[in-house]
Amino acid sequence: MTATLATPADPVDTPAHRDGNVLRWLGGYTASMIGDSVYYIALSWAAVQTGTPSQAGVVMAVSAVPRAVLMLGGGVIADRFGPRRVVIISDTVRCAAVLAVAGLLFLTGPGLWQLAVLALVFGTVDAVFLPAVGALPARVTSRGQLARVQGMRGLGIRFASVVGAPLGGLAVAVGGAAAAFTFAGVLIAVSVPLLISVRLRELPAGDGPGEEAGAVDGTVDGAEGTGVFGGYGGAGEAVGADAGKPGHGGERVVGERGGRSVHERLTGRGGGADAAGRDGGRSVRERLTGRGGGADAAGGGRMVGEDGGRSVRQRLVGRGGGLGAAGRGRVAGEGGKREGRRGGRVGAVVDSGERVVGEAGGGALGPGGAAWQDLVVGLRYIRRHRVLAPLMLAIALGDLGFVGPLNIGLTLLADERGWGASGMGSVLAGFGVGAGAASLLLAVRGRVPHAGHVMVYACLGGAVAIGALAFVPGVLAAVGVALLIGLLAGLSGALCGALLQTQADPGYLGRVTAVASLVSLGFAPLSMPLSAAAIGAWGTGPVFVVSAAVCGLGGVVALCARNLRRAELPT
């Protein structure tokens, strides 16, 4: 695909709730989430009925451990092969595994080894499925609709959590674990054709925040050797007339040539100081050795020579190149399809058969197909990003402070106050209503002005509400506080997801989503046993206050990060 001029949003911005493509994605995603809920009910019930409580715990852990350990690798796979393909394949594998065990249970009865194998396979595939499905929203709608899509996704998650558990319990009661597994497999199977029918938007390289958000402290990973020709990390604002023409041998024919003839281009003549040519007036020998070419020849001083003054060897190892060569999303003439010996922008190969760069952005994937190097590149990208780095830290602190009190902590609080199971259920319902209201607000409104500020203050307000929950006098007051927590936490969570989608370069979305998912699904649950032990030692009040302080610290991190605090969602 020949790259075109990147724009912030589509000329015709179809509202997400009226977009059939988005609705098909949402239907498939919701069906898959309901199937997940039914699956976990069936797995836990079958494990408890088959073995001892400790054995049941081992079976559940077998599912959680590979998901956490392999999550980052799943993000690399999503970026390498595309999120849609990975989602479809992984969802199909999950469906087949669940239905296979269901059939086995119908024939032989439940056994711990079958359940353990299913848990292992499901958890491993989940490590690939979750980053890929998290990277899809940016590819099914325009950037201006991402906040609305996040709200719709939140509604789907709430609906799945409310409906999935009762359906799972009903299936177990009617037909046992085998029937419940079958029902879960059918629900996941429903999602597969819906996801197959989803059409993806083609995103050119660098269709991200670029210079506006201060993407990576003025440089990108390509400037430090992350990929062949990785220095061109940003998407060119201007695409030359020759973009998409095949290269001849080693020559890359990309971008305007400043009105020069073939002979002038080969000899380095023609094209004044203001020409937008890639060659900067250099001869073939000068281009091969990395010499020649002034800032003005590159067009407005954005690019020093063809490769920032780098020689062939420097370009091959990813070294050299100044600030302009690193690409702040503004390299003149860059972004076209590079064909020939040096390969194209996506999935290109050189003579050795090695892939040059990956999807959506130079430097997004490392050379030579090394998955470990791709992971390092992605982590370095997040660490140096002025918005994503503090956002990841804020998400981690918020989840660590939130998960303990709103799970095991709430159960112990209800027992301590004598609210009983019904009281605890009412408090949880209040939280669910608040979170659903926040998702509905985003789905209807579509955009929240000053998203960074709103996210920060919602996080700080939610932290105060979490601390207050342990000191309310009765159930009704607790329900009201829980509703407030759900509203603020749901709003801040949805805005965090929307900012992740809009700030991350498309070539890194799988790895960015994997890191965020690892924090939420891998590390944050570790706070539950710690919260339980702390409540046993010091009581609910102090533990809820400390948890609130941890959540508040996430808000303080976001407040102190200037670029995150001022981040906006695209219109």
Image (cartoon, rainbow, N blue to C red):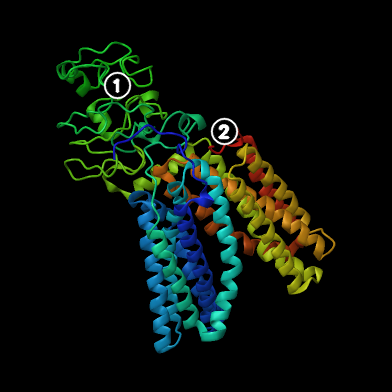
Look at the numbered disc 2 and give the secondary structure of its residue: helix
Q: Which quadrant, please, contains the N terminus?
A: top left
Q: Dot 1 corresponds to which residue? A: 309
For the C terminus, the image quarter is top right
As measured in the structure, the alpha-carbon distance from the residue carrying label 1 to the one carrying label 2 is 31 Å
| Residue type indicated by callout 1 | Gly
> Looking at the image, which is closer to me, 551 or 195?
195
Q: Is residue 167 above or below residue 455?
A: below
Tell me what residue is drawn at x 66 percent, y 61 percent: 432
Q: Residue furthest right?
A: 473
Label 1 CA crowd tier, 10 Å (few <14, some 14–19, many 20+)? many
Instruction: Write down the residue under mark 2.
Output: 563
How crowded pointer 2 is (Cα within 10 Å; few <14, some 14-19, many 20+) is rated as many
In screen coordinates, is 329 left or right of 266? right
Rendered location of residue 153, percent (x, y): 54, 55
Where is residue 309? Give x, y as percent. Answer: 29, 21
Quick check: 524 above or below 342?
below
Disc marking residue 390: none
Residue 165, can we see it?
Answer: yes
Answer with left or right where residue 555 lies relative to residue 469: left
Residue at point 25%, 38% (across, down)? 344
